[in-house]
Image: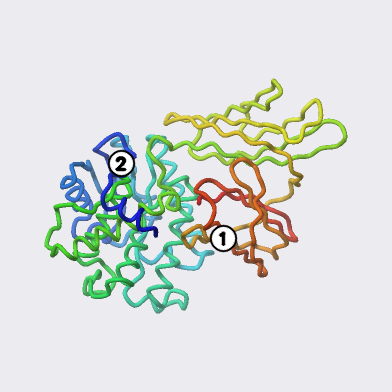
Amino acid sequence: MKKGLLAACMLLSFGLFAQDSVSVLFIGNSYTNYNSLPSLVNDVAVSLGDKVNYDSHTPGGQTLANHAANATVYDKIDDNPWDFVVLQAQSQEPSFPDSQVDVETLPYAIQLADSIYANNFCSETLFYMTWGRENGDPQWGPISTFDGMNGRLRNAYMRFADSVDGAVSPVGSAWKYIRDTYPTINLYAGDGSHPSYEGSYLAACTFYASVFRKSPVGASFIGTLDPVTAERLQTAAAMTVLDSLEQWNLRPISEHTQAAFYGEYFSTPGPTTVVLTNLSTKATNYYWDFGDGNTSTDENPTHTYASFCNPCSVTLIAESPCDTDTVQQNIGYIGLNEGQIHVEVASFGEGKFNISASATLQDVQISNAAGELLKLDVVLSGFVAEIDLSEASSGVYFVLVKTEEGRSMLKLMR
């Protein structure tokens, strides 16, 4: 991370909220209940001049499926138009094989998020990225070490957030930073799983940075910690969250709705047709302007121009009860509208991603939000492509994945 940005994390307010008070509902289990995490988040906030109005539902051992079947959870969701609702899965379940998570966990994350948005469309579903156990979980090789388990938890929580237009509080990533940098700070309780007071304080600072988009460095509340340890935990949370807001889908509260789309271009010597795929985030209504006097309110329209155009100018306005966003693209490259294939994304931070497809990859094309193809070296290896956007500016990118079985379009946030 650049030194200037670290100084900004430590010295400046990243207050993208106009408010200094947020409401948060914590839905989790013992990892949230240990050391009264919601109360710790508020204690950190109050010491920095902010406030968290919170409630919680955290019975031990609960999975997301358990929460989705519990009437008390829905009563608490409906009790307030929450700014944030935090979802925490059972400590192991997101790290299990993807095929298992796809059946036993992801559907319930989506079900709970749907209820959150039904209560208040402008609420943020915020996933609590937990950490790998001190020595991993021996029941499955890929999670038998801390790093292996922590990495799978990270990828799973990011997948949950992407599936529901939500965000992530990256406690597990801050946890790894402390383990790597300050190994004498013990983040675990005696069982090697639950958090010690240091671990819960690190989680509280990470949540403070996630919901206020401000640095917790300098918080006068340090509980039972010595000042040096507290400052190291505060700084780790600030670095992890504020250096990568887009990576964790932590958009400003005033920018919940983001307009985005991908356009495919077909032309003969006569008319030109564009097929538009809406990739907007947290939107309920759409207004398209095709630049030729014609418009549409369809979610995914197809438009044929009366005469040839290359490029064709298309503008999308995406609206929701929260806010409005506009994006314009010049569409002028050829594509095909073939069947979708299964594609998964793993983010490694700093703009580096792996794309895994269900069939052998033939080509991967990347374009920016303006529809311009980027000239990037993409490493293809069987079913996996390595993408490096570390030199690209922050924003939305579209990836067209081509395989022998078809193609698929996905969105990346840099």
Q: Residue at image x 54%, y 51%?
A: 412
When the figure is inspected, residue 361 is found, relative to residue 52, above or below; the finding is below
Residue 44 percent across, percent down from the top left = 19, 50
Image quadrant in which you'd find residue 197: bottom left
Which dot marks residue 315?
Answer: none
Which dot marks residue 388?
Answer: 1
Q: Which residue is mark 2?
A: 15
Q: Label 1's element?
A: strand
Looking at the rendered structure, the kind of residue marked 2 is Gly
Image quadrant in which you'd find residue 345: bottom right
Crowding at dot 2, Cα within 10 Å, few <14 / some 14-19 / many 20+, comes out as: some
Q: Residue at image x 69%, y 20%?
A: 293
**313 or 127, nearer to the observer:** 313
Q: Residue at image x 29%, y 52%?
A: 207
When the figure is inspected, residue 188 is found, relative to residue 317, above or below; the finding is below
Q: Residue at image x 24%, y 45%?
A: 55
Looking at the rendered structure, the kind of residue marked 1 is Asp
